Image: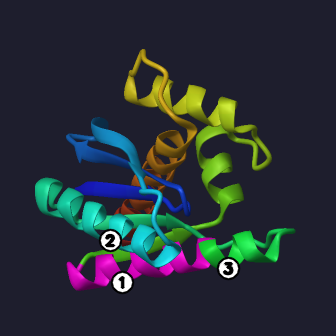
Amino acid sequence: MRILGVDPGSRMTGYGIVEHVNGRLVHVDHGAIKTGVGTFPHRLVDVQENLSRLIQAHVPNAMVVEEAFYARNVQSALKLGHVRGVVLLTAALHKIEVYEYSPMEIKKALTGYGSAEKEQLRYMVCALLQLDRVFSLDASDALAAAICHAHAGQFHKCIQNEKIKIN
């Protein structure tokens, strides 16, 4: 299964792609979609077009997006909501199943601690995917979301196997 994690942002949207192969996670790609300096609607188009290209190039089976959170700055929260909407729409247009996890769920899945710092999360992403280079926090958060989903999928598969054995 190939999983695309997305960390929406109005100026930079992180992405990370992992593949679950023979019981282990393999890093496929990561980076950030940097939007231009145009108006906000034009930046939304940048996100949509670049995300569509990524989907066409890597053909993921699932997309994971961090759930919306409450922010102190209402304007920032609204802009983030618009970007999330574009990300969700792009997934729907490509007929990709979308899964959402809270920031706390993602942090807990990777570090065991729901309030972990972003640097701790990046460290665990590098360790789990055997990456030695440092990359942006946006890409790290997106990879973390994809890893969280891969782990959740394995957990549910184990439960299903146990139910089959019991019955």
Residue 150 falls left or right of residue 96: right
Q: Amino acid at mark 1?
A: Leu
- Position of 153 with respect to 69 (left or right) is left
Label 1 sits on residue: 89
Query: What is the three-letter code of the residue carrying label 2?
Result: Gln
Q: CA distance from mark 3 to mark 1?
A: 16 Å
Mainly helix, strand or loop, the magenta region? helix
Specify whether 140 is left or right of 104. left
Label 1 or label 2, whichever comes before in sequence order: 2
Comparing labels 1 and 2, the label whose residue is closer to the camera: 2
Res. 58 in view: yes
Q: Write down the region rendered in magenta.
A: 80-95
Q: Residue at x 37, y 65 (%)?
A: 47
Nearer the N terminus, badge 3 or badge 2?
2
Residue 66 picture quarter: bottom right
Q: Is residue 95 above or below residue 127?
A: below
Residue 75: % across, % down: 74, 75
Q: What residue sits right under mark 3 in the picture?
A: 78
Real-space CA distance between mark 3 and mark 2, rounded to the nearest whole angstrom: 17 Å
At x 51%, y 39%, the residue is: 140
- Label 1 crowding class (10 Å Cα cut-off): few <14, some 14-19, many 20+? some
Disc 1 on helix, strand or loop?
helix
The residue located at (52%, 62%) in the rendering is: 8
Going by the numbered disc 3, the residue's amino acid type is Leu
Judge by depth and name the residue closer to the eye, 26 or 94. Answer: 94
Q: Is residue 53 above or below residue 18?
A: below
Which numbered dot is residue 67?
none
